[in-house]
Amino acid sequence: MSKNKSLSNISRSLHRDLGYFFIGITLIYAITGFILSARGLGWFKYDYNFQTNISKNISSEHFKENLISEAKSGKLDYIYKLGTKSVVEKNIKRLTFSKEENNTLYFDYKYMHVIYNKNSGETNIDYKSYPAFLQIFISSHLSTNNRAWYYLAMVYSVVLAFFALSAMVMIKGKYGFKKRGLSIMLAGIITVIIFLFFSFS
């Protein structure tokens, strides 16, 4: 068996087996990638309208830290579930104080709006987000290095690079990379460049 043929067979076997092994994570990234690409349209998001009572007479400067504390104590379980906990806390920290009228504070951040009455402690929260089961996968897609998923994502990135490179040596003959694959690869690269140009120019 020639060296080139051996390399081709090894690449095909690895390509096949790794493809089987990573079917699950590939589907997760494909689905969540589609959802994230369409996030500006608000697809798949739920509206959480919630009312609760927290401590009275909280100033605008200390409201966010108090709201996070109240949430951790279970006051906001309706929107502060396991799957959305980190997202909600992050959004609370990013809330911007809008105004104060009649002892009522108004805060906003993108899809989150909070109205707090200092006299009664009544707090109204309007929050738009993905359902908890979906948020888990989306958070995984955006994982950072402080989560276990990060290491699997790094391995998967290397495997994807292998999939692309191994395709160059898997097929021989008239359908091989040199005779057919090269032109298709160039067409793909040009397509990416065109979309980048129109997206960011």
Image: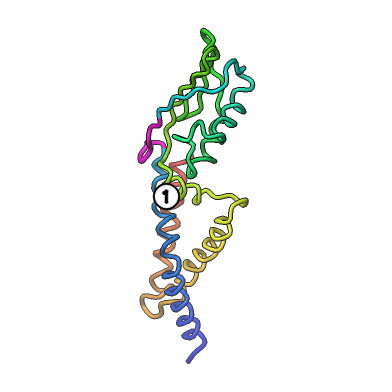
Q: Is residue 152 above or below residue 49?
A: below
Q: Which residues are magenta?
A: 40-48
- The residue furthest bottom is 1
Of residues 143 and 179, the one nearer the viewer is: 143
Residue 128 visible at all: yes
Q: Where residue 109 sits: x, y (%)?
A: 51, 27
Q: Secondary structure at mark 1?
A: helix
Of residues 195 and 73, the one nearer the viewer is: 73
Q: Count neighbours of disc 1 (C-alpha within 10 A) and say few if under 14, some if 14 to 19, many if 20 or more.
A: some
Q: Is residue 139 above or below residue 48?
A: below
Q: Where residue 180 sits: x, y (%)?
A: 38, 71
Q: Is residue 196 above or below residue 30?
A: above
Residue 93 visible at all: no
Residue in the picture at 57% in, 55% down: 150
Residue in the picture at 39% in, 45% down: 35
Q: Where residue 20 sits: x, y (%)?
A: 41, 70
Residue in the picture at 58% in, 31% down: 68
User: Does residue 94 appear to the left or right of 15 in the view shown?
Assistant: right
Q: Which residue is mark 1?
A: 32
Which quadrant of the structure image shows residue 21?
bottom left
Amino acid type, callout 1: Thr
User: Does residue 175 appear to the left or right of 81 in the view shown?
Assistant: left
User: Does the magenta-highlighted stretch encompass residue 42?
Assistant: yes
Q: Where residue 186 sits: x, y (%)?
A: 44, 61
User: Does the magenta-highlighted stretch encompass residue 179?
Assistant: no
